[in-house]
Image (cartoon, grey):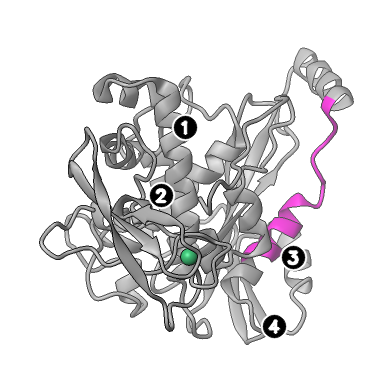
């Protein structure tokens, strides 16, 4: 583990099938030697669970468990927020681009667990601003929305969901034929995708029925999405999207997150080859960026002003990136909501790809 000043104490049994995985009341463990590895820290203590008998090490509780190159994880975490593509990160870290791709996926899964474990536990006490961040993955025939829910005062991003869209806008007749051909071969995205995705995102942000003020643009899917939230007394405030996108615009909190996604993530830069090739990786990289903006990034990098989590009273200081990544989180201890379980297990499908890699749990991983 990275903090070597205090001896490591295992927080719980890492095996998800052990009764001391969730609760540690009455748990006993014993020391079980140590092992030596090439990466620092070189000597890692081992332990044995007094109940299930399985052995594990201090490294089992690190986000870099089972990594041959643990240094690449933090480097990737920084570089993904600095507009680098996988190959550019790999060149600097002297590893394969596929290694960086796997680390980016691990960062995304960790971010989903972190966001949910440390989510606000009380009723939402500020208006929520919703919007769809539009991008694409694989090719421009496969656009998508990230449905974002952001606090109007704190700028905390409470939730996001992914929606596949049908290509629209101006197209040549050849492009229209190509779209028709692809839709015959691979099917069409659900025309109610934005409605469903926005309703799911709002349900993630405010699971218990409560009074809510929701701000959005005049997209016709939003009133339908809000009608799906039974039990919430909702006041809907619309702002025309042609209004200037200044700090005075009621949608500024979500416009700002759109801008951060576009400004910091290479996969959303227009007119480059760094676009995501898979919808799943858009979700993973978005989760990591949102965790960073909620917990690490000061409101203004020039003037400070606290992170969104601090503005919401969830934290007393910005959490540096290495600290966000210090402790491994276990999915069986976090209990993600159903939509994010799909994201965690790599089940966001890219229609044109067969045999996509899924994340399968091994030993509670
Ligand atoms: Zn055990």
Dot 4 corresponds to which residue?
232
Q: Is most of the magenta stretch helix, strand or loop?
A: helix
With respect to residue 179, does 149 lie above or below?
Answer: below
Residue closest to the far left? 5
Dot 2 corresponds to which residue?
289
Q: Residue at x 30, y 32 (%)?
A: 69
Disc 2 to disc 4: CB gap under 8 Å = no
Q: Residue at x 25, y 37 (%)?
A: 71
Determine the CA span between mark 1 and mark 2.
Answer: 12 Å
In terms of secondary structure, where does tag 1 sit?
Answer: helix
Q: Earlier in the sequence, mark 3 or mark 1?
A: 3
Determine the CA span between mark 1 and mark 4.
Answer: 36 Å
Disc 2 to disc 3: CB gap under 8 Å = no
In terms of secondary structure, where does tag 4 sit?
Answer: loop
Q: Which residues are magenta?
A: 186-201
Answer few, some or many: residues within 10 Å of disc 4's Cα (few below 14, many 20 plus, some between 14 and 19).
Answer: some
In front: label 2 or label 4: 2
Of residues 241 and 49, the one nearer the viewer is: 49
Name the spot of residue 163 as percent of width and height, x first.
Answer: 68, 47
Disc 3 to disc 1: CB gap under 8 Å = no
In front: label 2 or label 3: 2
- Residue 255 seen by the camera: no
In terms of secondary structure, where does tag 2 sit?
Answer: helix
In terms of secondary structure, where does tag 3 sit?
Answer: helix
Q: Earlier in the sequence, mark 2 or mark 4?
A: 4
Dot 3 corresponds to which residue?
225
Q: Residue at x 76, y 50 (%)?
A: 193
Count of marks, rendered view: 4
Determine the CA span between mark 2 and mark 4.
Answer: 29 Å
Answer few, some or many: residues within 10 Å of disc 3's Cα (few below 14, many 20 plus, some between 14 and 19).
Answer: many
């Amino acid at each position: 583990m990275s903090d070597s000043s205090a001896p490591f104490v295992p927080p719980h049994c890492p095996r998800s099938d052990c009764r001391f995985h969730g609760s540690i009341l009455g748990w006993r463990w014993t020391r079980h030697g140590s092992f030596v590895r090439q990466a620092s820290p070189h000597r890692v203590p081992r332990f044995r669970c007094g109940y299930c008998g399985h052995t594990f090490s201090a490294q089992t509780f690190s986000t870099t468990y089972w990594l041959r190159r643990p240094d690449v994880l933090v480097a990737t975490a920084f570089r993904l927020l600095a507009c680098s593509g996988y190959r550019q990160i790999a060149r600097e870290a002297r590893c394969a681009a596929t290694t960086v791709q796997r680390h980016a996926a691990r960062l995304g899964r960790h971010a989903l667990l972190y966001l949910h474990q440390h989510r606000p536990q009380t009723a939402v006490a500020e208006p929520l601003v919703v919007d769809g961040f539009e991008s694409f993955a694989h090719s421009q025939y496969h656009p998508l929305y990230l449905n974002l829910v952001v606090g109007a005062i704190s700028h905390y991003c409470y939730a996001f969901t992914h929606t596949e869209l049908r290509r629209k806008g101006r197209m040549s007749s050849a492009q229209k034929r190509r779209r028709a051909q692809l839709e015959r071969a691979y099917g069409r995205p659900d025309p109610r995708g934005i409605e469903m995705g926005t309703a799911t995102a709002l349900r993630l942000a405010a699971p218990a029925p409560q009074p809510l003020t929701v701000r959005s643009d005049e997209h016709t899917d939003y009133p339908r999405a809000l009608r799906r939230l039974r039990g919430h007394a909702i006041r809907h405030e619309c702002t025309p999207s042609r209004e200037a996108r200044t700090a005075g615009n009621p949608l500024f909190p979500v416009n700002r997150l759109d801008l951060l996604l576009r400004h910091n993530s290479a996969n959303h830069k227009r007119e480059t080859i760094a676009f995501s090739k898979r919808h799943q990786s858009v979700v993973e990289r978005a989760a990591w960026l949102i965790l960073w903006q909620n917990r690490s990034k000061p409101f203004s990098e020039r003037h400070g002003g606290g992170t969104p989590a601090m503005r919401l009273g969830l934290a007393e200081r910005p959490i540096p990136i290495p600290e966000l990544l210090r402790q491994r989180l276990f999915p069986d201890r976090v209990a993600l909501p159903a939509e994010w379980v799909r994201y965690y297990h790599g089940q966001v499908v890219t229609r044109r790809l067969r045999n996509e890699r899924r994340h399968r749990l091994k030993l509670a991983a």
